[in-house]
Image (tube, rainbow, N blue to C red):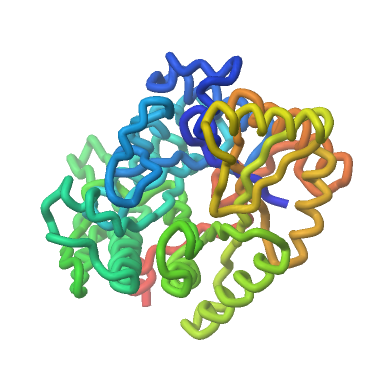
Amino acid sequence: MHLAVALDGAGWHPAAWREPGARPGELFTARYWSVAVAEAEAGLLDFVTFEDALTLQSSSTDGPDGRADQVRGRLDAVLTAARVAPLTRHIGLVPSVTATHTEPFHISKAIATLDHVSRGRAGVRIQVSQLDYEARHFGRRAVPLPDAESYEEAADHIEVIRRLWDSWDDDAEIRDVATGRFVDRDKLHYIDFEGRHFSVRGPSITPRPPQGQPIVSALSAAGALGDGAAAYGLVARSTDVGYIAVRDAAGARAAVAEIRQARESAGLSAQPLHLFADLTVFLDEDAPAADARRSRLDALAGAPYSSDTAIFTGTSAQLADLLQDWRPAGLAGFRLRPGVLAHDLPAITRGLVPELQRRGVFRRAYEADTLRGLLGLERPVGRYAAHTAA
């Protein structure tokens, strides 16, 4: 079983920052994120994701909600991951980027750089935006794209960054001081991408990443991203890892089947795709304590917590039962969203992980040095190098 943790501020509950140990004064420091990722690595988790967006958090779809009692603001996810990378050794680092308002050339070199500084542990979570007030930050469009077109643009975005990662052959760098040759220019390739949304010639300015292709992931959830079929299609056709936000095992089974069918229709069924179910978790030594803590947080927030995912409240053993019950739906693993980072992340690493290890379904040591290796994915050959050889 693969396990990941989604990191967002003080936790996914809006009142998490008010809990003991939350350290809200450190939220915008490198140390805060370094400590969180170190905890996740101590628990042998496959990777962490870093939430991000291009507008302030809000409970409203019309714009900032004006609330002053909840965390607002984030550090840049890619830069945070790059800062944490030298302080960790094994865990994958997967920042979120919004394809809708960013250029794929920029994202490709940022994630390639993260892969270099982490020595092969980078990934990216691609997301789309259909928020009018977010679009107004950039002035590229008067209104957001329709749902389906937003996902078509995101698919093109991913295709461009993948081609750019391959635009340097693995052996393009010579670095021969004696002959004065640093690079073999014949091993840098124009990608010449022409699509509806992007026109990119290439090559990249960053050498091919250590993994060849860092992991590309995306969330597929109609409630979170608009059109469910379009989101499923993006995951099916363009990613290595997909996160599905569902309420129960039956929902997971239906989502997996739809994504697998879309992947087969695209002629990609032979290529591996890992599907992770997202779960928001509140863990304690016993179920009543977990319920009481969540109720206390709800009272501080002024409303019951809701999510696009299933919300689990209980013990580590009960959560382990649930994960094992859901896994036969076709899931490779789970991405857990800690309700309160200070409480629930250690509960995952020090409670849930040992429980899964006792059951023989989770690793007892890291078995690979790259994120692709942890996920059992081979390092791909560069498409242009393969073409040249042929």
Q: Nearer the viewer, residue 278 or 121?
A: 278
Q: Is residue 281 left or right of residue 222?
A: right
Residue 323 lies left or right of residue 92; in this view the side is right
On screen, residue 217 versus residue 183, left or right, reads right
Tell me which corner region of the image, top left, top right, bottom left or bottom right, holds residue 225: bottom left
Residue 313 horizontal/vertical position (percent): 73, 40
Q: Is residue 270 visible?
A: no
Residue 327 in the image: state x and y as whole percent. Answer: 75, 60
Observer-nearest of 197 and 25: 25
Quadrant of the rendered structure where residue 329 is?
A: bottom right
Q: Report the number of numbered marks.
A: 0
Q: Which residue occupies 68% across, 36% down?
A: 282
- Residue that appears at 62% across and 32% down: 40
Tell me the residue at 32%/71% (across/down).
Answer: 152
Q: Nearer the viewer, residue 231 or 160?
A: 231
Residue 390, picture quadrant: bottom left
Above or below, comparing residue 364 to residue 236 in the picture:
above
Whether residue 366 is visible here, answered yes or no, is yes
Can you give x and y, in whole percent of width and height, for residue 209 in the image? 39, 48
Position of residue 220 relative to residue 114, above or below, is below
Instruction: Say if 193 sits above or below 298 in the image.
Output: below
As drawn, 251 above or below 61: below
At x 42% / y 34%, what residue is drawn?
81
Q: Residue 389, position in %: x, y?
A: 36, 72
